[in-house]
Image: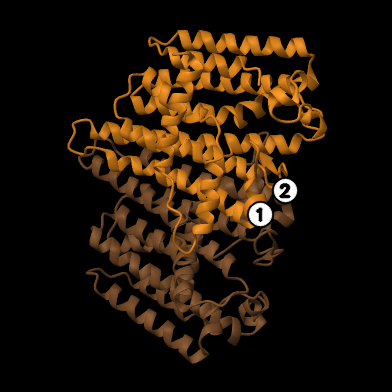
Chain colours: A orange, B brown
Amino acid sequence: MSFDLEQTKRQSEINEIIKSYLPKEEGYYKSVIEAMNYSISAGGKRIRPMLMLETFRLFRGEYTDILHPFMAAIEMIHTYSLVHDDLPALDNDEYRRGRKTTHIEYGEAMAILAGDGLLTLAFETAAGAYEKIDEKALDALNIYRRIMRAYKVLSMKAGIHGMIGGQVIDIEFVGKSVTKERLDMMYLLKTGGLFEASMMIGAILAGASAEEVDITRSIAGDIGLAFQIKDDILDITSSDIILGKPVRSDEKNDKPTYVAIMDLEQAKEEVANVTDRAKKAYESLPYENEFLKELIIKLITREK
Amino acid sequence: MSFDLEQTKRQSEINEIIKSYLPKEEGYYKSVIEAMNYSISAGGKRIRPMLMLETFRLFRGEYTDILHPFMAAIEMIHTYSLVHDDLPALDNDEYRRGRKTTHIEYGEAMAILAGDGLLTLAFETAAGAYEKIDEKALDALNIYRRIMRAYKVLSMKAGIHGMIGGQVIDIEFVGKSVTKERLDMMYLLKTGGLFEASMMIGAILAGASAEEVDITRSIAGDIGLAFQIKDDILDITSSDIILGKPVRSDEKNDKPTYVAIMDLEQAKEEVANVTDRAKKAYESLPYENEFLKELIIKLITREK
């Protein structure tokens, strides 16, 4: 089976897992649940739960029961961040993946609450992992410990010292000149934050050592960084049709980008350097997951 | 010492605990941290962490190290809900406790992100409790279990089936006629949700039985309900000066209230009935905490 076909198949399996953790649309407050489910069902490649699952497999993880709630949780957090990012006070976007954004479809108040609801549900869902522990098992204490560490990583990387910190830098830099150092920090936090959480949690729940988790973190951060620099390049070099969104939108929105602080060739070289660093780190691990490797390469070398 | 003085003293102690979990205002994204700290430092009576602590004491809890992160967390969640509630798309309030609301002081985008940041930080802070466990202790597994249960309660009661659900009902009922059943549900979720979480977590972390936790939940729900009905009554009977905010604001905002669906005497009787039910439940517990009892009475019989 080709990699693309295999990816689509695994994506469907992940969709089923996520779906099983979504709330039923009932009760006095079902409108907010509809808005939440609308947002998370908008499609998307489910890259974060996929990275989590494949990293878990890389480290020969066994208890998928405790992994699945975290896979759903990371996608809920990613989705909430999009819902809030799209709001008029932030990016003011009316469409995402060809559908109306949540506040256009359900109104601004409901979009704010739906985002809050998804973020909170993410932590509730992940907390449910502990109910899957066989408390009579000899290593029960060990599994509790893994879940709590995963929980800490999830909240840290989604928070101000992770994704939210990146969003704040993004907002504050609009219209301002920016250094490479700050841009790297923004990308590492904004996109890298949840990539790091995904791969670290996969590793932690599989029982990887602290050193292995740290290597995983650095790989994920580099993927996030390379992914975003590539995004800046594609915004200039691609066409609207291939990219599926208007090109040169960063320039129009006066957003700081890599191609604003260096020329295109230098930016491409940066991607190559970061990719190389991630590749070396990956190869230093004593495990192999061919699918994960191909997924990472695809994320970085994508043309759309 | 009078109860009021004692309460002020304990409130200061709680403020110190909360403060110790607030992030430092530094780094590229310090603006959002400033907005978060501004919001949570706006004062407030710290009723939720106080209820948590006193319920913990009621059940003779021992490990305050694992309680403190949850006390800070519940106040962070309460604060984030106020920051988002005040936004133009929701209640559109410019002042709270005599200070500018967060979006007036820092702008709407930053207020949205500061709210998200506080909510996420709440879960990160609470997750930190596990680092306080003495893993060599014989009951380590038991303590892990308590923390995970507390975590689940915190996220559930703050989410769509708790506080957020109540906020959604609140939004949807503006300008509409409402039944007592729906109003009760709104109050039970919107205010009762975090009250329940506070007292249940205090009980869980202290090692209370499932039955005791459930009694605690029903007491807390009733406190929330009585508190809100009392709020509706005071909105009619009090004066601006005593209440510290404009009276009859519910009527002006076309919000459904108890005094809109029944007369004042009936509403007062409702408070008395709910209070009586909570009192009986409290007395069924084989423990005593005089301060907690007085705090509960004060919350319900307040005149402002």
Task: Please state the horizontal and vertical placement of residue A244, each as a whole percent of the image.
Answer: 69, 28
The C terminus of chain A sits in image quarter: top right
Gap between marks 2 and 1, in whole Å?
8 Å
In this rendering, position of residue B99 left or right of residue A6: right
Please give the count of numbered marks on the rendered protein.
2
The answer for which chain carries disc 2 is A
Residue appearing at x 50%, y 53% in the figure: A33
Residue A88: numbered disc: 2
Share a chain, discs 2 and 1? yes
Q: Is residue B299 visible?
A: no
Task: Please state the horizontal and vertical placement of residue A269, each as a whole percent of the image.
Answer: 69, 9
Circle 1: residue type: Glu
Query: SS for tag 1?
Result: helix
Query: SS for tag 2?
Result: loop
Nearer to the camera, B66 or B145:
B145
The answer for which chain carries disc 1 is A
Residue A108: numbered disc: 1
